[in-house]
Image: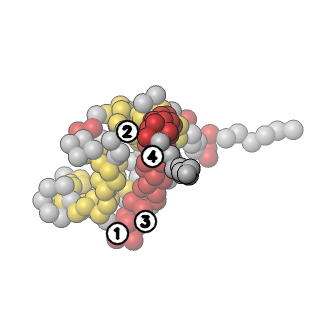
Amino acid sequence: MTTDKRGFTYIELTVTLVVLLLVASLAMPNLKHLAEGQEIATFKTDLKTLPVSARELAISNGQTVQVTYDDQESQLVVSAIQETASAGQGIESSTDDGEEGTTLRTIPVPGTVEASSYMYQGVEADAGNWSIRFYPDGTSEAGGIGFEAGNYQFSLTIRDDGRGAVVDGDIPDLSTESWKAGDYEQRTQ
């Protein structure tokens, strides 16, 4: 009488399981970097829409909109502020709620990304005093904020016409990107 053995031995199952675990351990770091890369790409997309939405909110609501960086919460904050003219004092800023203004939008900075440099009107700034204002006429203050994710640098730049861009590298010098019409000379033949 012969017995027909079917199935796998314990050793065969153990070897198969070890091989599968090795393959999975090799693939795991790549999946982690893929997820971090997707998180950074999503953040960069949010940054691209930030100047557009802040400018549109300022125009449509008829009030100044301010973008700041909250270092404690690691997020960009878009808020509406009220500017009132004081007699003989110029323009003073006051906010709707007495503190930071009405928050309209926040963009959290991913954990793998760090804000590294700040530029306001061509001058380096720090997180505590960096802000860019968008005005109801569609203009804004010029500046930018730089970010680092490991060895990768990228920046949000905002020009004084209220338009912005996300660029690779550190914050570029925005003063060289626009010229007044009077600076051009007519070409002679």
Helix, strand or loop status at disc 4: helix
In this rendering, is residue 109 above or below 66?
Answer: above
Q: Which residue is mark 4?
A: 35
In terms of depth relative to the viewer, which is nearer, 82 or 179? 82
Q: Residue lying furthest top in this view? A: 151
Helix, strand or loop status at disc 3: helix
Q: Three-letter amino acid code at disc 2?
A: Val
Q: CA distance from mark 3 to mark 4?
A: 32 Å
Q: CA distance from mark 2 to mark 3?
A: 27 Å
Q: Three-letter amino acid code at disc 3?
A: Glu
**Residue contact at pointers 3 and 1, CB within 8 angstroms:** no
In terms of depth relative to the viewer, which is nearer, 60 or 91? 60
Helix, strand or loop status at disc 2: loop
Q: Which residue is mark 2?
A: 113
In this rendering, is residue 86 above or below 180?
Answer: below
In primary-sequence order, the first of circles 3 and 4 is 4
Q: Name the residue: 31% across, 33% down.
A: 125
Q: Name the residue: 47% across, 42% down.
A: 9
Q: Which residue is mark 3?
A: 56
Q: Which residue is mark 1?
A: 62
Q: Three-letter amino acid code at disc 4?
A: Ala
